[in-house]
Image (cartoon, rainbow, N blue to C red):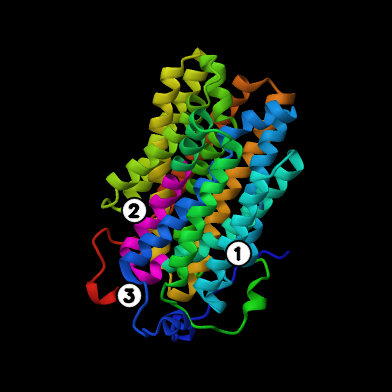
Amino acid sequence: MTLHLQVRRPASEAAVALPPDPFARRLGRSDYRLSGRPAVFVLASLVVALLASSAAPTPLYAIYQAQWHFTPITTTVVFGVYALAVLAALLTLGKLSDHVGRRPVLVTAIAVHAGALVIFATATGVPALLSARVVQGLSTGAALGTIGAAMLDMDRELGTFANAVAPGMGTASGAIASALAVRFLPDPTHLIYLALIGVLAVQAVAIAAMRETVSRAPGALASLRPEITIPRALRTPVLTAVPVLFAVWALAGLYGALGPALVHALTGSDNVVLGGLSFFVLAASAVIATIVLRRAAARTVMLAGILTLVTGVAVTVTAVSLGSAAVFFAGSAIAGAGFGSGFQGSIRTVVPLAAAHERAGLVSLLYVVSYLGLGVPAVLAGFGVVHGGGLISTARYYGTAVIVLAALALFGLLKNRPGRAAEPAAAPAPRAQRLR
């Protein structure tokens, strides 16, 4: 695998014509295409569904662990292998939709993701969990960059906002819905996955009815070669955003892998809803912060995110040391606001500057950084729990590491001061510039 920097071809060479829609022709209505803002909402809902299904196993790990008697290392490996699979898909499939179209990639990814949920629903041991997480990660990675690019194709302003807010909504809804299913519904390890399959089926129909925003172009096979592509004009904004993305997603990795165990250690309660609440509070706070700060300047949002992240994690580490569940949840809410602000600021600093033919690859690159932060530290934390100082000690060290990462991100943000032209405006784009 080769990773290298490459300057993409000028936008004038990009194939962005809108081809005839075969789905519309089958309906006998050549003008029927889902596009503009309605299409952005459908695409954002798909991000929510994909990440909700990825977060759904988190409250179920305790059930799996009780049934199959595995260690916390196994829990974090099952969590981390998903992130690695997402990375593999982002690196190989991230730009495929620029050549074959957005819809074919999305419909295929939905079908594969539904297959992963079937594996979950029929799992009888750890190997099945690992297989399901790998398939789930591959399909999610293939879809994320494509969805992000498609939302920008449809509506640049709304698409940028949706790219920032949808991941948190998906993570929050998946974690709490799964926990509620465990608490109140029969057979939760099957029912939650079957319900998600039904949601994906509806979304697949909507995607099939969507307007295609790019025409087929040569180079599809060549695009599968793993590479990290940074357009020349975006290098400084990307390098500014990278440490912020890694830091905020490392925090999400802690809550996704060890959040329920920490809540159990602090409260002594086996209530699954309470265990899943930590991840929900983190993600829900991120969504609220994203919405509240959507009109602020991108650099201001990123700076606020870093400072809030440091404060929230410091409170959380203190709560773990004191054994206070109330302070832990308060710290989680503050840290979640930092997560949402940092992620939104990074997305808004970089993504709106990309040309149409650069979007899928650029969004994929940002998710590569995010999922490295999500997966690698979480797996290391699992080893720390078993072979290090235990859960509480590992949480302290993990939180301290996140604070250090955030401090490095703050240093990079203050050092790399982009010019006024590099920062996207908070005001809506002119109406004539939007794709409808």
Numbered marks: total = 3
- Is 47 situated above or below 152? above
In x, y percent, where is residue 123?
70, 42
Q: Is 345 displayed left or right of 83 in the figure?
A: left
* Amino acid on which disc 3 is placed: Leu
Residue tagged 3 = 435
Element class at badge 3 = loop
Residue closest to the eye, 41 or 91: 41
Quarter holding the N terminus is bottom right
Residue 121: in sight, yes or no? yes
* Amino acid on which disc 1 is placed: Ile
Foreground mark, 2 or 3, reads 3
Crowd class of label 2 (few under 14; some 14 to 19; many from 20; radius 10 Å) = many
Q: Which residue sits at x=40%, y=47%?
A: 414
Q: Which residue sits at x=65%, y=45%?
A: 120
In x, y percent, where is residue 111?
59, 62
What are the residue bounds of the magenta stretch?
151-171
Disc assigned to residue 228: 1
Report, in whole angstroms, how far the alpha carbon at label 2 lies from the one at label 3: 23 Å
Q: Main secondary structure of the magenta part?
A: helix
Residue 307: in sight, yes or no? no
The quarter holding residue 97 reads: bottom right
Disc assigned to residue 401: none
- Is 432 situated above or below 194? below
Task: Look at the numbered discs 2 and 1 and tell me whether their residues touch, using CB distance below 8 Å.
Answer: no
